[in-house]
Amino acid sequence: VRDPLALHCAMSSAVVCGIQTGPIPSDDDDIDNDSGKSCTVSATASDWANLKTLNVDVVLASEVLYDKSEVASLAQCVSALLKKRGGTLLLTDPRRERAPGCREAFISEIKAEGANDVSISSIDANSNVVGMVGGNNNGEEIVIVRANFGFRR
């Protein structure tokens, strides 16, 4: 997230939904994914090139495919974040792309970075999904790109 207001809104949404939030874990933190403890949501405003040392299990991204020249660096960042421990990318994007060809280029790049089980699915604009653009039945159709790194379903 490059926009601090968007970061604030995302973390505030987590709090309102009752999800635990906390600092971003470092490589020195001992994280036991099998402990049964509730998850903690963390976020940071940073350049993609500076995120590669974080420990994460899931990368959530939305409307980040707007500049074809950024696609390779975004794919490298996602790969670096998820390959080490295994994890999942969930990326939402308008069906009608903001920058035509970015989604296809990104999918090609993440596959080259080692992503497996890459899929694209649609969210119908007339469904009652929170966060649809427009917020009503006139919302824009959204697609979700899902990719796994380091493990197979």
Image: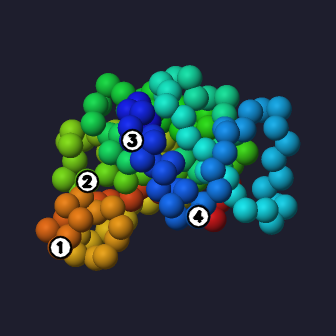
Disc 3 to disc 2: CB gap under 8 Å: no
Rendered location of residue 67, percent (x, y): 28, 31
Using the image, tell me which numbered label, if any, was put on residue 18. 4
Q: Secondary structure at mark 2?
A: strand
Query: 141 above or below 3?
Result: below
- Give the mark toward the camera: 4 or 1: 4
Q: Earlier in the sequence, mark 4 or mark 2?
A: 4
Q: Element under label 3?
A: helix
Using the image, tell me which numbered label, if any, was put on residue 137: 1
Spot occupied by residue 71 in the image (x, y as percentages of width and height): 38, 32
Earlier-in-chain disc, 4 versus 3: 3
Amino acid type, residue under disc 2 in the picture:
Pro
Tell me which amino acid carries mark 4.
Gly
Q: Secondary structure at mark 4?
A: loop
In this picture, residue 80 sits left or right of residue 62: right
| Residue toward you, 5 or 85 | 5
First reached walking from the N terminus: tag 1 or tag 2: 2
| Marks 4 & 1, CB-CB < 8 Å contact | no
Query: Please, what is the three-letter code of the amino acid marked with disc 3?
Result: Ala
Q: CA distance from mark 3 to mark 1?
A: 24 Å
Q: Residue at x 77, y 32 (%)?
A: 27
Placement of 26 over or under 30, stated as above or below: above
- Which of the image's four quarters has the N terminus? top left
> Percent position (x, y) of residue 36?
80, 66
Local secondary structure at mark 1: loop
Residue that numbered label 2 is attached to: 94
